[in-house]
Image (spheres, rainbow, N blue to C red):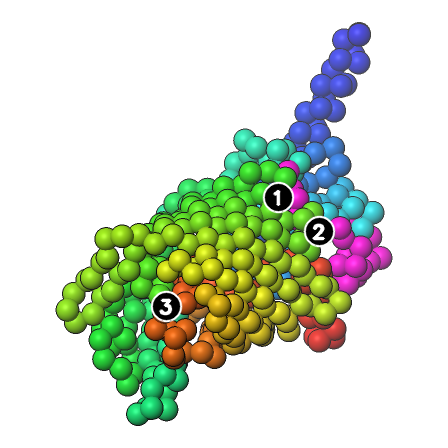
């Protein structure tokens, strides 16, 4: 190789590296300006790969739409791949936009609706995560807390002297990521109004937990959680879940060990003997109906065995569900819903984000008396506050459908 050719090749390589760094930095800056966090980018021969976490926007699909538009605004050529991670840094959604579509959008030959229609979506991002290894993380969320205020409602029809037992409270929680996959939650419940005595009338801790998530490749996720949960349970659990490449199927297993924990006027009461609970579950998403079917077989907290089935319908950010369950030979059922609370986006102020809960979620049990309650049948618990199927829901077909619906509504 002569010296002249060598110099030309070195010059071309240096120019490409400078262009790649500049292009990746433009996407970094654009996503950071949008409020996204834990941003990583890498430029390849085909185009740009960017991973980010959305803690700013309430709606999963609305935040994804803003990220797509903003990242496209920073690109004029080459393909664009976005990897969306959840609040524990685990990959949830992969979006691929080919170079032709990027160029068509840049020169006005394609609209954002065309982009939504053409883009490829899935849940597996192993190749992209491998290419992103070793890249710098911008806008880190580690050790930067959110103060989230959750509404807390207890409602039960169990007595003859009162139509309903009720309690309304506010439950602010500090939620702070520590490192990749790890987050702590510390919540206090402040009673507002109630017709009950004891625990429901007492200022008390809510969820106080440490949670560590791990991504195991090939769409396997695992979590370990320990601390204070709801339904007066304290302890820990482990969970592993697999998602299909298109996100239509989920299969999982969960195992927990907890003790009774009660805060009331008499202090803190804890039982000594732990109770084991377990579940094997599955979900399928039916895109034509925007509906999820859920089923599980369970060992509940007090040793009774049973099964649960649920139908959940998505109306954009609203979800409504009906469920039925068998526990210890007895039958129960009810409904659930999640509705968005005001505020589409929240920014940090001096490192902290102060916000209401993204959604108000409620689950009602039809049976709250008799042997079912006396025998403690069907008892379970959640390991994080306000768990529902609207928050952080990144099913690919759901995201695409409601991105396009949002465009139609605003045009």
Left or right: 191, with 120 as reference point: left
Residue carrying label 2: 246
Magenta stretch contains residue 285: no
Q: Where is residue 135 in the image (x, y as percent from the top left)?
A: 55, 34
Closer mark to the observer between disc 3 and disc 1 = 3
Give the image location of residue 273, x and y in percent. Answer: 27, 52
Q: Within the magenta stretch, is there residue 107?
A: yes
Q: Report helix, strand or loop for mark 3.
A: loop
Pointer 2 or 3: first along the chain = 2
Q: Name the residue under label 3.
A: 376
Q: Foreground: 334 or 399?
A: 334
Q: Is residue 119 left or right of residue 28?
A: right
Residue at the spot 30% in from the left edge and 69% down from the top edge: 189
Question: What residue is shown at x 75% (from left), y 67% (from top)?
Answer: 288
Q: Which residue appears at 55% of the width and 38% of the height?
A: 216
- The magenta stretch spans which residues? 102-126
Dot 1 corresponds to which residue?
Answer: 219
The location of residue 346, given as percent across then percent down, is 47, 64
Mark 2 and mark 3: Cα distance apart in space: 39 Å
Q: Which residue is located at x 73 percent, y 47 percent?
A: 96
In terms of sequence position, does the residue under pointer 2 or pointer 1 come before the other? 1
Q: In this view, does 184 lie to the left or right of 311?
A: left
Q: Which of marks 2 and 3 is in front?
A: 3
Q: Answer whether labels 2 and 1 touch (C-beta < 8 Å).
A: no
């Amino acid at each position: 190789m002569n010296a002249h050719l060598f110099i030309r090749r070195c010059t071309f390589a240096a120019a490409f590296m400078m262009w790649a760094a500049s292009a990746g930095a433009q996407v970094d800056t654009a996503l950071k300006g949008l409020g996204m966090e834990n941003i990583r980018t890498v430029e390849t021969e085909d185009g740009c790969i960017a991973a980010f976490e959305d803690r700013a926007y309430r709606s999963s699909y609305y935040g994804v739409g803003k990220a797509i538009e903003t990242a496209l605004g920073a690109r004029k050529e080459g393909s664009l791949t976005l990897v969306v991670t959840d609040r524990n840094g685990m990959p949830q959604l992969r979006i691929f936009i080919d170079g032709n579509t990027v160029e068509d959008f840049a020169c006005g030959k394609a609209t954002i609706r065309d982009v939504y229609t053409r883009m490829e979506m899935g849940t597996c991002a192993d190749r992209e995560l491998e290419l992103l290894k070793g890249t710098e993380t911008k806008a880190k969320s580690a050790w930067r807390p959110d103060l989230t205020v959750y509404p807390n409602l207890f409602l039960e029809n169990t007595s003859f002297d009162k139509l309903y037992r009720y309690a309304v409270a506010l439950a602010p929680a500090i939620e702070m990521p520590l490192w990749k996959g790890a987050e702590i939650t510390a919540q206090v419940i402040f009673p507002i109004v109630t017709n009950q005595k004891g625990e429901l009338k007492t200022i008390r801790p809510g969820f106080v937990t440490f949670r560590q998530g791990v991504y195991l490749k090939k769409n396997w996720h695992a979590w370990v959680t320990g601390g204070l949960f709801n339904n007066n349970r304290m302890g820990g659990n482990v969970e592993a879940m697999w998602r299909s490449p298109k996100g239509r199927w989920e299969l999982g297993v969960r195992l927990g060990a907890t003790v009774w924990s009660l805060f009331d006027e008499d202090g803190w009461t804890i039982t000594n003997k732990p109770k084991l609970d377990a579940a094997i579950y599955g979900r399928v998403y039916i895109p034509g109906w925007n509906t999820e079917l859920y089923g599980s077989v369970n060992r509940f907290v007090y040793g009774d065995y049973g099964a649960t089935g649920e139908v959940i319908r998505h109306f954009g950010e609203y979800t409504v569900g009906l469920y039925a369950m068998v526990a210890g030979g007895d039958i129960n059922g009810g409904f659930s819903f999640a509705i968005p609370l005001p505020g589409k986006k929240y920014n940090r102020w001096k490192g902290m984000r102060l916000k209401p809960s993204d959604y108000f979620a409620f689950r009602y049990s039809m049976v709250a008396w008799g042997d079912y309650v006396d025998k403690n049948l069907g008892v379970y618990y959640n390991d994080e506050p306000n768990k529902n199927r609207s928050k952080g829901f990144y099913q690919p077909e759901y995201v695409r459908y409601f991105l396009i619906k949002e465009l139609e509504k605003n045009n």
